[in-house]
Amino acid sequence: MEVPLQPSGTDTVKPPATSVGILGWMRKNLFNSVFNSVLTIVALIVFARIIPPFVQWALFDSLWTSTGAACKEADGACWSVVTNNLRFILFGFYPYDQQWRPLCCVTLIVGLFLYTGKPSRWSKGLAAAWGMSLVAMGILMPGGILGLEPVEPARWSGISLTLLLSLFGLTAAYPLGVLLALGRRSRLPAIKVMSVLYIELIRGVPLISMLFMASVMFPLFLPEGITVNKILRAQAAIILFTAAYIAEVVRGGLQAIPRGQYEAAESLGLTYYQKMRLIILPQALKIVIPPTVSILISAFKDTSLVVIIGLFDLLKTTQVTLSNPEWMGFSAEAFLFIAVLYFLGCFSMSNFSRRLEKVLAR
């Protein structure tokens, strides 16, 4: 009868405690060299001097439901400027008794975005849900039908305006940017020249200039008696501006595809449309996910520039709140709240892109 071999002592020895777990991670990432060790220690000292006073100011000494007069006597943060004016900051001049309508729109956008965060949930039903949500927002915001009180676009403001500009702007700018990238690589001289002129012209001016042109100069070219809503003009400027940058990113992805992929598609007898839809674009768009998301995040933040042309977005409604004498001097708390909202939006988009990259990498 054979006796089973016993494992040697070295097979059962566990790794040192300093190379696994939290200690192992710290040793590998924070104290793996003299320079990094010094930087880690300096950073810990700085954090130790900054974080405790900030927490004391923001949480323990703060006021949440008091008046502005009481806040001026307090040592901590005055979050009352946010809680007491939350509805105006979020919805601005939209009629007070009708603010459930922009609330439904915002909830619908955020809920669908969070649900879409997992690519495994993508389906035709989800695409239909997005389409129905856009139709619902087109009914709820302006009203005038189904017994809803009409609300002119001039009163759309706050987070609903910010999200609408972002959602429709990014949704329309992406396919337009892809078409411009294909046009710039076209073999037809007229299409290529027009695409190059458009991309270089738009990328050569700042977004603020385009917003001013859309707000001030564009109405001068319209026939007398015809006007276009300022929100639509700002939306068009954001779309045209963002599309030019997306076009250059997508063009880089198209150039990264090996020439053999083009030749293989042509050898199969595929048309130009089939070649791009089935072979080239799926590979190119996957390559450029990180820079594309960076541009979309920048476009989301740049929607705050519409405050320059007098639109009451989330930033503008906050500024109006701070112009009230009762809440003057508490801009730090108000803008910290706005910064958190923008951070959540940008972080969600970044996290979604990372998930998408992992799924497509499989």
Image (tube, rainbow, N blue to C red):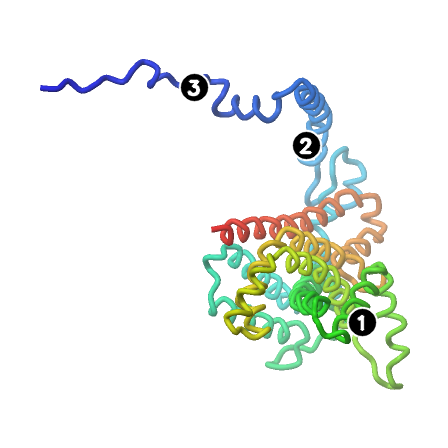
User: Residue 250: which quarter of the image?
Assistant: bottom right
Of 78 and 264, nearer the camera is 264
The amino acid type found where label 3 is placed reads: Pro
Q: Is residue 202 visible?
A: yes
Residue at point 78%, 62% (across, down) = 312
User: Of circles 3 and 1, which is in front?
Assistant: 3
Q: Secondary structure at mark 3?
A: loop
- Callout 1: few (<14), some (14-19), or many (20+) C-alpha neighbours within 10 Å? some
The earlier-in-sequence mark between 3 and 1 is 3
Q: Residues within 10 Å of mark 2 (few under 14, many from 20)?
A: some
- Asked which quadrant contains residue 2, the reply is top left
Against 296, is 329 above or below?
above
Callout 1 secondary element: helix
Give whichever of 115, 253 is nearer the camera: 253
> Residue 10, image x and y in percent?
35, 15
Compare marks 2 and 1 and give the one earlier in the sequence.
2
Q: Position of residue 100 (x, y in %)?
A: 62, 66
Earlier in the chain: of badge 3 and badge 2, it is 3
Q: Nearer the viewer, mark 2 or mark 1?
A: 1
Residue 15 badge: 3
- Most extreme residue toward the bottom is 224
Of the 4 image quadrants, the one containing the N terminus is top left
User: Which residue bears the numbered disc 1?
Assistant: 230
Whether pointer 3 and pointer 1 mark residues with C-beta atoms closer than 8 Å, the reply is no
CA distance separating discs 3 and 1: 66 Å
Amino acid marked by disc 2: Val
- Residue receiving disc 2: 55
Residue 326, disc: none
